[in-house]
Image: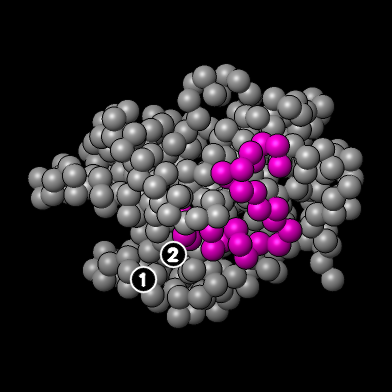
């Protein structure tokens, strides 16, 4: 088992299941600090479309890795693992409990497994060719191409996540190694943390979809269009945000090629599909304790965390 001072709690699962509320409840109960594991909440100024914790929620418990970059800057899973590890060290040194919360499965799994990212050789000619092919053929074709060589990794990526799709294709063309294989080869013999992994879901899928639809409507009421317009007007430099669910669906509205109502419906559908991919990712992870988001998840989680801190729960095994 990992060292006692490296105990962490992880809260994952699809969007709109109440991860933020649960993390705040556990932080209050166990003296925790929250580390965001969300690939979009790192960006300053993009609050509504990323479902970022409100100012009041962030004031209720210390938050880390939120609002740390401008939208023009790139960020990777390797960056997250390095920075989250630093946060965990600082939090535990203060005698607090690190609570990693978010829906980006790649970030969470890479952190708790201790993936050691190797620097990928950069071939500007290959990168340019892949980007040109993506522009000409479209994201769906590039995603299909990745699925043909690395179906497991492709299954966890949205076709519009062009950055990761192209990086995985680039790795395969340069080395003949898939991203799935590289990640598995990058694991240490022992996990770096004693992690309790919790995930939220609803027994009825329609309940989740209804919550997603309502959340999108609330985002519109809260002013997500202003954020989306900012991304649209800076889409050449805000490349990650311009591909993110929550903003790109409104681009046709700004171009006057679609109504606002149809764009809202498109965002609701895209978010529902994203939630399905999140569920797929977390369900294939090992040692995940699933909580019923409808049935007092804080009470369920409180008991699991108590047992975890008392060494009554076995978590990630070592690799054989």
Question: At 76% from the left edge and 29% from the top edge, which residue is drawn?
Answer: 30
Classify mark 1: residues with Cα within 10 Å, few (<14), some (14-19) or many (20+): many
Question: At 54% from the left edge and 39% from the top edge, which residue is drawn?
Answer: 18
Q: Give percent across and percent down for residue 91.
A: 74, 30
Residue 194 is a magenta residue = no
Image quarter (top left, top right, bottom left or bottom right) of the C terminus: bottom right
Figure check: 320 above or below 308? below
Front-most of residues 265 and 178: 265
Asked which secondary structure carries label 2, the reply is helix
Residue 4: numbered disc: none
Figure check: 259 above or below 42? below
What residue sits right under mark 1 in the picture?
142
Residue 276 is a magenta residue = yes
- Determine whether, in the image, residue 305 is placed left or right of residue 203: right
Q: Give percent across and percent down for residue 70.
A: 42, 34
**Viewer can see residue 77:** no
Q: Give the range drawn in magenta.
A: 275-300
Mark 1 vs mark 2: which is more N-terminal?
1
Asked which secondary structure carries label 1, the reply is helix
Q: Give percent across and percent down for residue 195.
A: 76, 48
Figure check: 21 above or below 238? above
Which image quarter: residue 26? top right
Q: Give percent across and percent down for residue 251.
A: 21, 46
- Determine whether, in the image, residue 286 is placed left or right of residue 160: right
Residue 165: numbered disc: 2
């Amino acid at each position: 088992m990992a060292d006692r001072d490296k105990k962490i709690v992880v809260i994952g699962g699809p969007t709109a299941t109440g991860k933020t509320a649960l993390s705040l409840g556990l932080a209050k109960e166990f003296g925790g600090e929250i580390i965001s594991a969300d690939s979009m909440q790192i960006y300053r100024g993009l609050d509504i479309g990323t479902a970022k914790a409100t100012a009041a929620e962030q004031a209720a418990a210390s938050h880390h890795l939120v609002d740390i970059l401008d939208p023009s800057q790139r960020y990777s899973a390797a960056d997250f693992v390095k920075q989250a590890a630093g946060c965990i060290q600082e939090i535990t040194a203060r005698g607090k409990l690190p609570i990693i919360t978010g829906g980006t499965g790649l970030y969470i799994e890479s952190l708790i497994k201790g993936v050691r990212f190797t620097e990928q050789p950069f071939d500007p000619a290959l990168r340019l060719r892949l980007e040109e092919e993506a522009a000409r053929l479209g994201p769906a074709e590039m995603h299909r191409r990745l699925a043909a060589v690395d179906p497991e990794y492709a299954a966890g990526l949205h076709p519009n996540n062009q950055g990761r799709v192209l990086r995985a294709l680039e790795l395969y063309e340069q080395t003949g190694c898939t991203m799935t294989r590289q990640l598995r080869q990058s694991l240490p013999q022992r996990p770096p943390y004693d992690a309790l992994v919790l995930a939220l879901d609803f027994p009825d899928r329609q309940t989740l979809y209804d919550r997603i639809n309502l959340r999108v409507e609330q985002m519109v009421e809260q002013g997500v269009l202003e954020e989306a317009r900012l991304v649209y007007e800076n889409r050449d430099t805000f490349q990650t945000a311009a591909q993110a669910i929550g903003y790109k669906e409104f681009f046709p509205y700004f171009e006057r090629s679609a109504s606002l109502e149809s764009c809202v419906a498109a965002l609701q559908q895209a978010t529902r599909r994203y939630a399905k991919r999140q569920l797929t990712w977390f369900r294939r992870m090992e040692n995940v304790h699933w909580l019923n988001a409808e049935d007092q998840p804080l009470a369920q989680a409180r008991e699991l965390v108590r047992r975890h801190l008392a060494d009554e729960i076995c978590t990630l095994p070592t690799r054989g």
